[in-house]
């Protein structure tokens, strides 16, 4: 049995006059009614109670008085996901859904839906927030910009593309080191410390007309030589989003829409939450339907191809989804914003249990949305991957 763990967080803080506005939005639907009756007492979503998150995770991009978002427009030529033979998993799925607090689970095998179920009031037409699953989307946009020639090389200094970082510690950090979280720049990702970097960066007052995250990150100091140690940093994925936007001249929601969402055939409108400066929080905060999360996994599993042609450089996915740096857990590693495993499978992950698991060898994609009691839970994470192991075993027995 493989135990697959990791630190997962997106860094979203929702703020604004929630209480009065929620009352006026009572009539919109049941999720709003839950929030109106039980309004959060804290603007940080980490400290919402489970009932508030059950409702709020479906409507974060509708909280326009609290946080802005940018629309990712669906395709006019949807990639169908036909129903396949149901998997006989020999698992008590009622108990699994309850234990994992799942709002949705979808298993694709060879592009066919072999299992699909929803909970916590979720349904196929609704969106659910991604948290750090978004990091793996952001990574792929770097690859596309590299193939298009908007980025010259992953060995280029980050400050070559983000002018506001010139003269900072990031002069000595490459794009590759951002992707693999090996910059060596000091960063505190603690979700329980109010003075941690991940808790503070969204409240930072930017200066000199810079994006908020650039203004914050250029003040950081070096902890280790670049390229030597892995250290998880949502702030640096947010820098990656700024880098792609400045290199391409496009906001990353529109870039994703143009390069992947519409041509691959995503079925539903999605969105990306914005920081106070109007830039996407690219280490977090997409709102996507479960089927489109699964379609994205399928896009990656099938080599990042649109109409048979890869939109990524040769060898990109092999590098992005294989271990580039150890994270100190046997059998696991980190690629380009993907969590990697020695059997060739890999995942995108976010707090409260969000997961896209991809196993290209078995042509298998599994997508989970959920709402764990706590943001991170090593026991639930281990049990989730025990379930994935059973799915892999079942698929092998049927081949």
Image: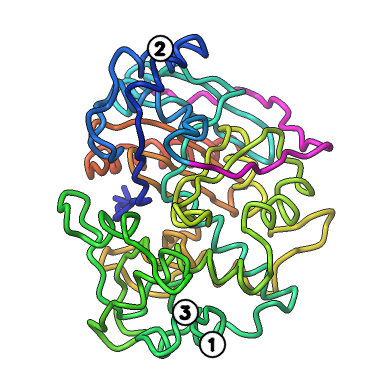
Q: Nearer the viewer, residue 363 or 15?
A: 15
For mark 1, give the secondary structure. loop
What range is drawn magenta here? 68-91
Residue at image mark 1: 155
Q: Is residue 256 left or right of residue 355?
A: right
Residue 323 rendering spot, x and y as whole percentages:
44, 70
Report the magenta stretch's main SS.
Answer: loop
**Residue 164 image label:** 3
Marks 1 and 3 sit apart, C-alpha to C-alpha, by: 19 Å
Nearest the eye: 339 or 63: 63
Percent across and percent down for residue 68 are 51, 42
The percent coordinates of residue 49 (x first, y second) are 24, 27
Of tags 1 and 3, which is closer to the observer?
3
Q: Residues within 10 Å of mark 1 (few under 14, many from 20)?
A: few
Judge by depth and name the residue closer to the eye, 368 or 54.
Answer: 54
- Is 14 magenta? The answer is no
Mark 2 or 3, which is nearer the eye? 3
Looking at the rendering, which quadrant does residue 207 occupy? bottom left
């Amino acid at each position: 049995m493989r135990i697959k763990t990791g630190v997962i967080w997106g860094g979203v803080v929702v703020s604004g006059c929630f209480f009065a506005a929620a009352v006026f939005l009572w009539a919109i639907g049941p999720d709003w009614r839950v929030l109106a009756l039980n309004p959060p007492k804290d603007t940080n979503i980490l400290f919402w109670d489970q009932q508030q998150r059950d409702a709020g995770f479906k409507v974060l991009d509708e909280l326009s008085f609290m946080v802005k978002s940018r629309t990712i427009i669906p395709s006019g030529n949807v990639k169908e996901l036909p129903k396949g033979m149901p998997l006989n998993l020999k698992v008590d799925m009622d108990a699994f859904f309850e234990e994992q607090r799942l709002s949705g689970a979808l298993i694709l095998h060879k592009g066919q839906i072999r299992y699909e179920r929803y909970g916590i009031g979720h349904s196929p037409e609704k969106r659910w927030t991604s948290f750090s699953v978004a990091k793996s989307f952001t990574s792929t946009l770097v690859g596309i910009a590299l193939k298009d020639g908007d980025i010259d090389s992953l060995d280029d200094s980050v400050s070559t593309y983000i002018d506001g970082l010139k003269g900072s510690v990031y002069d000595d950090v490459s794009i590759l080191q951002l992707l693999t979280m090996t910059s060596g720049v000091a960063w505190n990702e603690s979700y329980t410390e109010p003075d941690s970097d991940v808790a503070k960066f969204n409240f930072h007052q930017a200066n000199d007309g810079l994006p908020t995250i650039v203004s914050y990150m250029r003040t950081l100091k070096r902890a280790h030589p670049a390229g030597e140690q892995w250290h998880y940093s949502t702030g640096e994925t947010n820098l990656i989003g700024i880098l792609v936007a400045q290199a391409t001249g496009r906001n990353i929601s529109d870039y994703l829409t143009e390069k992947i969402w519409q041509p691959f055939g995503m079925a539903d409108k999605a969105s990306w939450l914005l920081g106070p400066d109007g830039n996407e929080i690219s280490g977090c905060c997409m709102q996507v339907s479960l089927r489109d999360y699964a379609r994205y996994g399928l896009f990656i599993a099938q080599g990042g191809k649109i109409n048979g042609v890869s939109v990524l450089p040769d060898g990109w996915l092999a590098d992005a989804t294989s271990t580039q740096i150890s994270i100190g857990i046997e059998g696991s590693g980190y690629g380009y914003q993907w969590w990697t495993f020695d059997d060739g499978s890999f995942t995108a992950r976010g707090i409260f249990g969000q997961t896209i698991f991809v196993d290209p060898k078995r042509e298998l994609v599994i997508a989970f949305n959920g709402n764990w009691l706590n943001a991170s839970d090593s026991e639930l994470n281990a049990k989730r991957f025990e379930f994935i192991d059973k799915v892999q075993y079942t698929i092998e027995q049927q081949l």
